[in-house]
Image (spheres, rainbow, N blue to C red):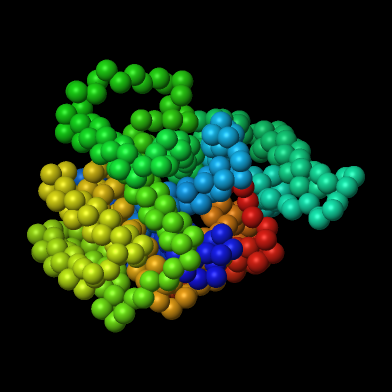
Amino acid sequence: MSASAKSGRIASIDIIRGIAIVGMVLCANIGFQSDLPAWMFHAQTPPPTYAFNPDVPGITWVDLVFPFFLFSMGAAFPFSMRKRLERGQSRWSVTGSLVKRWFILTLFAIVLGNAYSIWSTPRPAWQVHIYMIAVWAAMFLSLVRVQNPAGSDGWKKHLGTAVNLCGIIMFVALSFVFTRWFGLALSKDRCDIIIMILAVIAVTGGLIWMFTKDSIRLRWLVFMLVAAIKALDSYAPEALSFVPSCACVSWFFSWDWLQYLLIVLPGSIVGDMILKHSRSGEKPQIGRNGAIAGYVALAAALVQLWGLFTRHVTADFIISGALAITFFCLTWKERNVYTGTARIGFLLLLAGIIFDPIDGGITKDHCNLSYVLTTGGMAALTTAFLLMLEIRSDIKGRFIAGVGQNPMLAYTVTNFLIGPILSLVGILPLINALAEGSQFWGVAQGVMITLLMMCVTFAFTKLKLFWRS
């Protein structure tokens, strides 16, 4: 594979994660009052009211950002945890690191949720903007991984710990400002739900990988078990009435969140395949037919944005099936990580389309089987396409991959740094005014802010300043 594999990084995984983050920031910053078409927003929050309607079936590109991120999270499990085990860490030690990761992400979610609530204060907007920048600075200091200088001693030996401690102290000071100056109460129930779900899925998915790391078949059995439980919950909920629910933990755990393992677990299987391939030192020869097949796989993912959104489900299934057959015919002699990933993608995709009418239409909220299977398949097919390019052309995609390497920094830099700065200097209000009723400026607003996010994140990645996540 590419040189990135030799350095412990796989460009395809970083790129798919970067695509998810870019899509997340773009969809959040396009003009909501710019007369843009419905496919530019979540399928279930269509214009002009943008009111959530759980009865609207279909998906748009906006509905893919979270599943794509989950898939990349699963693909990264083998790289992070197998490396720890091979360095001699015990299973208990690696499990402890998973719990630590859950704890950090949970605190991160609570910090974000409470910080967002500051917009309800009657204080002047400029004070809120400055406070948001200060919160981002505290997050940066608390989460940044600082490498101690080689051969350092004395205080330099503990430089990273000192920087993180400064961030924690800054958070304590900001909490007093939050409660005394802005008059708001800190609450554990006020959190960023996306990060909270990621925290739970990171620890449960990681534990499942630990348990099944030597048996892909066993992991598929766990996948089938989770799918069966999800099906029971959807079609015969009374069968699961014995499952306890505890209100005291509902703020940080819900059984419903485990349905996203149906995206993470296939991602982890693909991750194991990629890791095995990268260590083999072999570079498969992908000829003209194999390259064409890669574009067929990508087309199968993209066609869902037409078929499932416009509700031409039968036609979508026929086209997707034809593309799957075409892919198999083009690659029937090939057995490599790229074709294996695509086959997993086609399996999940076709299963998801079959469940669409059973579920009454694919919906992100409330999440159904069709959604997790279809979007997981789309993520796998897109990853397969990227693997084909990486193997055949040695692509690195450094810019978007650099964003994918620093996900939590990228996730926060727009709302806590770029947005407040643009508002303080008067640029953001001007752009918002231009975007009112203008499709061009509505899209331009999102693209500009997203590019700024990418540039800032890439700069920190180049400086090797990564956040713990």
Give the quarter of the image for residue 360: top left
Task: Using residue 163 as the reference point, say whether residue 38 is left or right of it.
Answer: left
> From this viewpoint, is residue 129 visible?
no
Q: Residue at x 31, y 79 (%)?
A: 287
Task: Using residue 120 as the reference point, say whether residue 346 is left or right of it.
Answer: left
Decide which of 273, 198 is in the foreground and name it: 273
Q: Residue at x 46, y 20 (%)?
A: 248
Give the quarter of the image for residue 385: bottom left
Residue at the farthest bottom position:
288
> From this viewpoint, is residue 396 visible?
yes
Decide which of 243, 288 is in the foreground and name it: 288
Decide which of 187, 145 is in the foreground and name it: 145
Task: Using residue 248 as the reference point, say whether residue 259 is left or right of it.
Answer: left
Q: How many marks are shown on the rendered structure?
A: 0
Q: Residue at x 68, y 50 (%)?
A: 144
* Position of residue 174 measured from the top left corner of the image (x, y, whole percent): 71, 40
Q: Residue at x 46, y 38 (%)?
A: 210
* Position of residue 209 measured from the top left corner of the image (x, y, whole percent): 43, 41
Give the quarter of the image for residue 386: bottom left
Decide which of 121, 380 is in the foreground and name it: 380
* Position of residue 433 measured from the top left corner of the image (x, y, whole percent): 49, 68
